[in-house]
Image (spheres, helix red, strand yellow):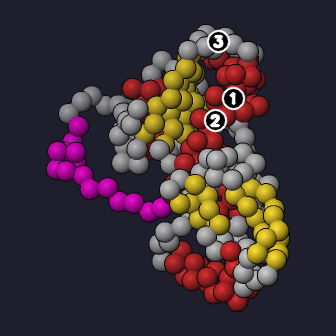
Amino acid sequence: MIRKIIHIDEEKCNGCGLCAAACHEGAIDIVDGKARLVRENFCDGFGDCLPGCPTGAITFEEREAPEYDEAAVKKAQEAKKMSEMKHEHHEGGCPGSRMMQFKQSEAENAPVSMERPVSRLAQWPCQIKLVPTQAPFFDGAKLLIAADCTAYAYANMHEEFMRGKVTIIGCPKLDDVDYTEKLTAIIRDNDIKSVTIVRMEVPCCGGLQRAAQNALQASGKFIPWQVVTISRDGKVLD
């Protein structure tokens, strides 16, 4: 039958997973880092996934497609609910929320023979949503923009990345916000000397990197910057 259904432009898709989370019917999965409509009979054509797409990769189209199967959708939703109650994750959805367990060697589990660690957090608040756009601690600062999870994934976060920097943190997926405007104001209205972006390897973390890069461009300033990616098992990837 000919009906209205969503279309995902894979060239524009950044794999953030927001559309998969917004689709209550479970029609969309993240496959190889891209959002895909994998269950056409689950798509009701209402477009709950459209407003959350940061790149405009999702549009409506009218074409030949299977009829919306409400019964199959409800059955899948019940199965998903039962799976979540058991703290399991299906193969679809955002890769950033997929359950993983990392095996550590005896050497990695051994006590660290060093002095008591020192916090290198230079200011408060540190959440991007809470930090003011202008503050004395931004004057002449080396700015670290870090994804929330990096401090838990990377063991030496304080010494290697936070030391000597003003640290602000956030998660674009959980905060459900585009940080670009606020980061632009922070960089534009303060004497920022450099910017370091530390993100996780998961696709949804791309939103933080993209917002920081857009803010640097929008600020009109030429500031040294770099991106460091942390793997889910706590290694520096680049």
Disc 2 marks a residue whose amino acid type is Arg
Q: Residue at x 23, y 37 (%)?
A: 112
The label on residue 222 is 3
- The residue singled out by tag 2 in the image is 210
Q: Residues within 10 Å of mark 1 (few under 14, many from 20)?
A: some
**Which secondary structure dominates the residues rendered in magenta?**
loop
Dot 2 falls on a residue whose secondary structure is helix
Q: Is residue 179 visible?
A: yes
Residue 152 horizontal/vertical position (percent):
43, 44
Instruction: Find out whether residue 140 is within the magenta segment.
Output: no
Which region of the structure is painted magenta?
97-112
Q: Is residue 99 magenta?
A: yes
Residue type, label 1? Asn
Nearest the eye: 214 or 45? 45
Q: Amino acid at mark 3?
A: Phe
**How many marks overall?**
3
Q: Which residue is mark 1?
A: 214
Q: Is residue 4 left or right of residue 191?
A: right
Residue 175 can be seen in this image: no
Disc 1, SS: helix
Mark 3, secondary structure of its residue: loop
Q: Please rate how many residues cluster around mark 3, counting C-alpha atoms within 10 Å: few if below 14, some from 14 to 19, many from 20.
A: few
Q: State which tag comes first along the sequence, 1 or 3.
A: 1
